[in-house]
Image (cartoon, helix red, strand yellow):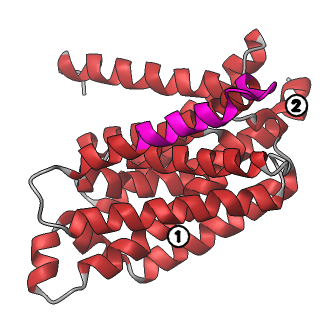
Amino acid sequence: MHDFFLLMWKPLLACFVLAGIHSYLGIHVIERKVVFVDLALAQIAALGATIASLFYFDLHGPVTYWFSLAATSLGAFIFAWTRTREEKIPQEAIIGIVYAVSAALTILILSHSPEGDEHIRYMLVGNILLVSFPEIIKMAVLYIAVGGFHWVYRKKFLLISTQPEKAKRDGVSIKKWDIIFYLSFGLVVTSSVHIAGVLLVFSYLIVPAVVACLLQTQLRARLFTGWIIGIITSIAGVILSYAFDLPTGASIVACFGGFLLFFVLFRRLGKI
């Protein structure tokens, strides 16, 4: 037990921090019906890091982070702009196209790199096992700042996510607040992908929020439910990783999938 905490306390703490902000943002994503926007933004962030590697910047360095953030900000503007347009094509289609193109460009850029396969694997599942305590602190401070900003303007964010037509009637600038939302969202995703990878970030965003929205109707109840699910699943994934010497990020993603599967089965059986 002592060896477990000695080795895994930092990854576990990082997971708790990830669960805190992503459970909240996931509720907005579910309400907006743009489930794959996080996956797309995460892939765009990965593309930015890949472009930085063309200039021989360290994959884990600050310059690479700014490349990722710049790419994600561009994606945020695209998603904010396409949501406010009155088109017949659903925004989810745009999000899917952006994801596919970003993933393809990443693969093309890395196709002649001797470390291409390792780079792709890192972008997908990260390496949260090697996260440092200073990285966790920086991540926590950033997420607290973003969460605090969303709390101050929570009425605006909730209105444009849940009742965009009412927001329009009330004279709220949906485009402006969408841009602010997606920029803050992109800032979180860029920082998360840098540590946890695309798939783990997506899992933290979607699975707790989906279950919480099915079980609860009030925002506060959904938040607490999402946090509890994120924490419990994180602990299960880290224990699985330690016990069977498995990649930590992939283990947690698998636990999220297993949790959602059992939840759906129990719900179908009328147990929940």
Instruction: Name which of mark 1 and mark 2 comes first in the sequence.
Output: 2
For image coordinates 24% across by 72% down, the residue present is 160
User: Whole-percent x and y of residue 44?
Assistant: 53, 49
Dominant secondary structure, magenta: helix
Q: Which residues are magenta?
A: 99-117
In the rendered image, which quarter is residue 36 located in? top left
What residue sits right under mark 1 in the picture? 147
Q: Which structural element holds mark 1?
A: helix
Q: Is residue 133 above or below residue 170?
A: above
Q: Which mark is residue 64?
A: none
Q: Toward which corner of the image does residue 174 lie, by quadrant? A: bottom left
Quarter of the C terminus within the rendering: top left
- How crowded pointer 2 is (Cα within 10 Å; few <14, some 14-19, many 20+) is rated as few
Residue 229, percent from left and from top = 47, 38
Residue 39 appears left or right of 221:
right
Horizontal side of 106 relative to 263 (left or right) equals right
Q: Is residue 173 left or right of residue 254?
A: left
Say which amino acid is labelled 1: Gly
Q: Is residue 126 left or right of residue 84?
A: right
Figure quadrant of the N terminus: top right
| Residue with the most extreme bottom position | 171
Q: From the viewer's perspective, is residue 217 above or below residue 82?
A: above
Q: Quadrant of residue 114?
A: top right
- Residue 213 included in the magenta stretch of the image: no
Answer whether residue 116 is magenta in the image. Answer: yes
| Residue drawn at x 77%, y 29% as measured from the top left | 113
Which residue has dot 2 on it?
7
The mark total stands at 2
Q: Are marks 1 and 2 in contact (CB under 8 Å)?
A: no
